[in-house]
Amino acid sequence: MKTVLITGAAGDVGTHLSRELAGKYKLRLSDKRALQPPKGQTFMRADISKMADALRITKGVDAVVHLGGYSVEGPWEGILQANIIGCYNAFEAARRNGVKRILFPTSNHAVGFYRRDQVIDHRVYPKPDSRYGVSKVFGEALGSLYADKYGMQVFMMRIGNVNPKPIDKRRLSLWFSPRDLAQLVSIGIEHPDIRFEIVYGISGNKRAWYDNSNAFRLGYKPQDDSEVYAAEVLAREKRSGDAIAEAHQGGVFCTAEDVPNPAAPRKPAKK
Ligand code: 15L
């Protein structure tokens, strides 16, 4: 059984992912915050913005799923530490420890300034909608460098919004169910021919703004489609009055200086 490190495991995506992948891989969870690992999984507390921590947690694993970092728009200092320095440390520590396979959750916000009336694929030029989006483009560029220069196998998922159900109109296009997330991550861990791939981390949504043919080519068969929730979501949708946000795929990230995280992190375990 492969040993897989998940950084940022206490966050919302990490929580869904570790639950979905339990029993399939030996999971090593890591986060800055303490967490009580489920039975059969281990936990290493680490701050990814420190190289010594990054080296410690990446030792002896078969693959890294680097979820750790700042997950919304926010102040530059936080994004710099967590998403620029932290991302570099994750790739560099994996390389130094001989870990070949790394999965990185880039984001829809790396391309959030594309308009909603456009369908984009994995080859489009980045159009970040925020400092956060820029940090994800940095991660994509770093992954490309580590694949070409050091032969690492890099799987980039431009993730939409992971949630048990889509939460609003924009997320009908971006929704990524936890079981589809687990399927796509498993492809990223297992597929024999990954060198450097960009795919969109969304379910099989009828309203998608993405041509996700690169994921389908690698065997992804999403089981969910947000359309089954569309009537209920649209009935409670209120217009924001922000024309720029409503015209672009990144929504409010295109205009706001701070965005609250819609998904509250898992409560830290008592020490
Ligand atoms: C993201 O990239 C964030 O990590 C997540 O918290 C959501 O805000 C998501 O995008 C989204 O666009 O809904």
Image (cartoon, rainbow, N blue to C red):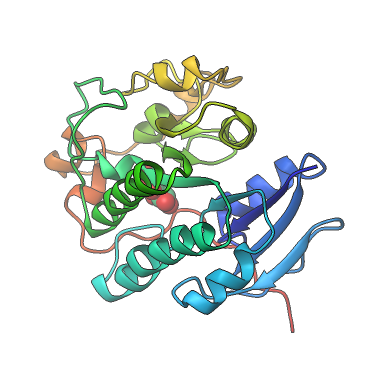
Residue 86: quarter of image: bottom left
Residue 183 appearing in the image: no
In terms of image quadrants, where is residue 238?
top left
Name the one closer to the observer, 117 or 80: 80
Q: Identify the residue at image location x=37%, y=22%.
A: 208
> Could you tell me which residue is drawn at 24 percent across and 71 percent down?
76
Give the answer, above or below, for where 159 lies relative to 37: above
Quarter where residue 91 is shown? bottom left
Residue 199 makes an appearance in the image: yes
- Left or right, residue 11 beside residue 128: right
Q: Position of residue 101 (x, y in %)?
A: 55, 44
Seen from this angle, which residue lies furthest right? 39
**Front residue of this view, candidates 184 and 88:** 88
Q: Is residue 222 above or below residue 151?
A: above
- Please report the residue visible at 31 percent of the width from the left and 23 percent of the height from the top: 209
The percent coordinates of residue 173 (x first, y second) are 38, 27
Q: Nearer the viewer, residue 249 or 61?
A: 61
On the picture, is 215 further left or further right than 64?
left
In the image, 90 versus 215, the foreground residue is 90
Question: Horizontal and vertical percent for residue 140?
Answer: 33, 46
Q: Residue furthest bottom?
A: 271
Q: Is residue 128 left or right of residue 259?
A: left
Q: Quadrant of the C terminus?
A: bottom right
Indicate whether 92 appears above or below 155. Answer: below
Quarter holding the N terminus is top right
Number of marks present in the image shown: 0
Q: Residue at x 61, y 59 (%)?
A: 9
